[in-house]
Amino acid sequence: MPNKFIKPIIVGNWKMNGLKSSIDELVKLIDLCSKNTKFDVVIAPPYTLLHSFNDLIKKNESLLKLGAQDCHHIASGSHTGSVSGEMIKDSNAQYVILGHSERRIQHKETNELVSKKAHAAQLLKLNTIICVGESLEDRSNGNHKEVIGRQLADSLPNGFTNKNTIVAYEPIWAIGSNNSASKEEINQMHKFIASFLLKYSKENYSLPIIYGGSVTQFNAKEIINIDYVNGLLVGGASLKADSFFGIIDAI
Ligand code: PEP
């Protein structure tokens, strides 16, 4: 059964974008979102903005939630340039995106590392958004289900639950391409992921499964209404309050 009783979640991933002055976009977004109670809206700016964004969210008593884009799997120590789950918690962020394809490709992150990070984050009671997605080559070869199944089996840590884990299906070929996957492709893969997880988890969990890849205010409504889609992960269109709110407003 499509899991449509879950409150939809819309996540904005700013990636390596945003300076101190970007707080203006957050001010605007807080204002635009003030009447939204239908969806959980999460904004994931770069680490450097987490504390100031948290201050503003608190000051405005906004329902917007804060997320980080990655975390290290160790709490502290000699890991120059890394940020731990504890540091993310310290900023009051409640979510962390893990295993994004850009980290898997650019930082050579393996499923095993993603699983370690997710385990560490879940111990700290962070909500983990674990990304999976196939390349164009995998899809052309017809290997997409096998690849996603492997990513899920190896990236989800022992002990994950439907309270601390969201799966983001993000076909790599759709990210930043202005060409989202089709309705049929999204439905087929979300359905596959839902039934895989049901069988894979001993507790038969149905986790929220969100879609990412060139979501805009023009296709958001159609995508969110697809069976087995419980939310959206938005990159480019989340950078400006107007276009991000356009998505929230459209659905
Ligand atoms: C992403 O990278 O997570 C993403 C979905 O990007 P975009 O919306 O720009 O395709």
Image (spheres, rainbow, N blue to C red):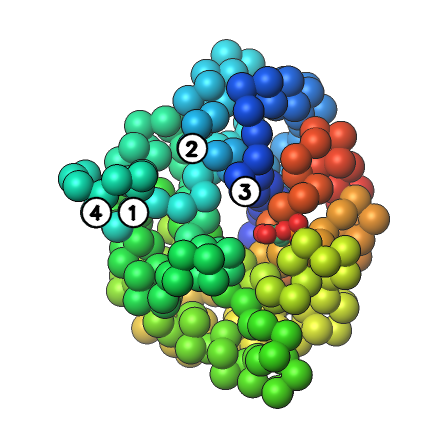
Identify which amino acid the numbered label 4 is placed on: Ile
Say what secondary structure mark 4 lies in.
loop
Residue 35 quadrant: top right
Residue 72, numbered circle: 1
Q: Is residue 25 above or below residue 97?
A: above
Say what secondary structure mark 1 lies in.
loop
Rendered location of residue 251, percent (x, y): 76, 45
**Residue 189, can we see it?**
yes
Identify which amino acid the numbered label 2 is placed on: Tyr
Q: Residue at x 76, y 47 (%)?
A: 216
**Residue 125, can we see it?**
no
Of the image marks 3 and 1, the number of the one nearer the N terminus:
3
Q: CA distance from mark 2 to mark 3?
A: 10 Å
Q: CA distance from mark 2 to mark 1?
A: 13 Å
**Mark 2, residue position:** 47
Q: Looking at mark 3, is its residue's CB closer than 8 Å to ligand 1?
A: yes
Q: Residue at x 72, y 58 (%)?
A: 177
Residue 217 quadrant: top right
Q: Quadrant of the N terminus?
A: bottom right
- Label 2: few (<14), some (14–19) or many (≥20) C-alpha neighbours in 10 Å: some
Q: Mark 1 and mark 3 in contact (Cβ < 8 Å)?
A: no
Identify which amino acid the numbered label 3 is placed on: Lys
Of the image marks 2 and 1, the number of the one nearer the N terminus:
2
**Mark 4, residue position:** 74
**Mark 3, residue position:** 15
Q: Mark 1 and mark 2 in contact (Cβ < 8 Å)?
A: no
Residue 86 quadrant: top left
Q: Mark 3 and mark 2 in contact (Cβ < 8 Å)?
A: no
Rendered location of residue 138, percent (x, y): 58, 80
Rendered location of residue 37, percent (x, y): 63, 33
